[in-house]
Amino acid sequence: MQKYLLNGFEVFKVLPISHEILRKKIYEHYNFTNKEEDTLSIMIDTLRLYNKLHSIEALALAAPQVGWEKRLFVCADLELQQRKKAKYIQKVDVYLNPEIIKKSNDLVVSKENCLSIPPNQIACVMRSNKITMKYYNLLGIEMVVEAEGLQACIYQHEVDHLDGMNALEKATSIIDSQQC
């Protein structure tokens, strides 16, 4: 994992979609050490700062995108973001060992950008509009969440990263972000 300073914060370099780590399925990992907690903190700062400083709206980040081979992702609390109409990420949730256990047959076209793909590309991906996902929180407690709409699409996108897949591969079409 490559780190650098950005606006006085230590952040990770986000890997391009062609990187070999993003092609690997990442398997479960439950126990975290203090060093890994520090890595997680830097990953959260990376998401917040990329969202703030880049034209792309980054709402989630999977560990492999920063070169960390752990089955986890971080995601902005979308409900809080929308409720506060926040311009910057207020709260980030951590999802350990996520697994989508149910998908609806109701499909939507999700227009997805990603920090690992060129910023001018938007992948149009068919996603389930509603999902149920099992994961563990930082205390190691198993959680189950139901999500729909944007939240469901984000969860599916991030789990794809953990399974070695990406939005460009799943896209029915790729459009230029200028067209959106």
Image (cartoon, rainbow, N blue to C red):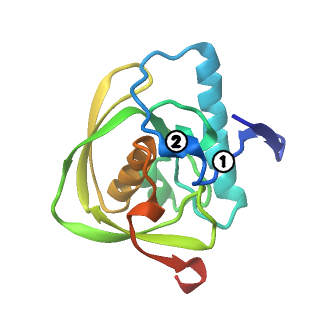
Q: What residue type is labelled 2?
A: Val
Q: How crowded is mark 2: few (under 14 residues within 10 Å), some or many (20 or more)?
A: some
Q: Is residue 110 left or right of residue 179?
A: left
Reading the image, the residue beneath label 2 is 92
The local secondary structure at tag 2 comes to strand
| Residue projecting furthest to the bottom | 179
119 versus 179 height, above or below? above
Q: What residue type is labelled 1?
A: Val
Q: Nearer the viewer, residue 25 or 93?
A: 25
Q: Which of 141 and 70 is in front in this view?
A: 70
Q: Is residue 134 left or right of residue 166?
A: left
Reading the image, the residue beneath label 1 is 14
* Residue at position x 50%, y 30% in the image: 70
Percent of width and height locating residue 126: 31, 67
132 versus 113 height, above or below? above
Q: In this view, does 119 lie to the left or right of 131?
A: right
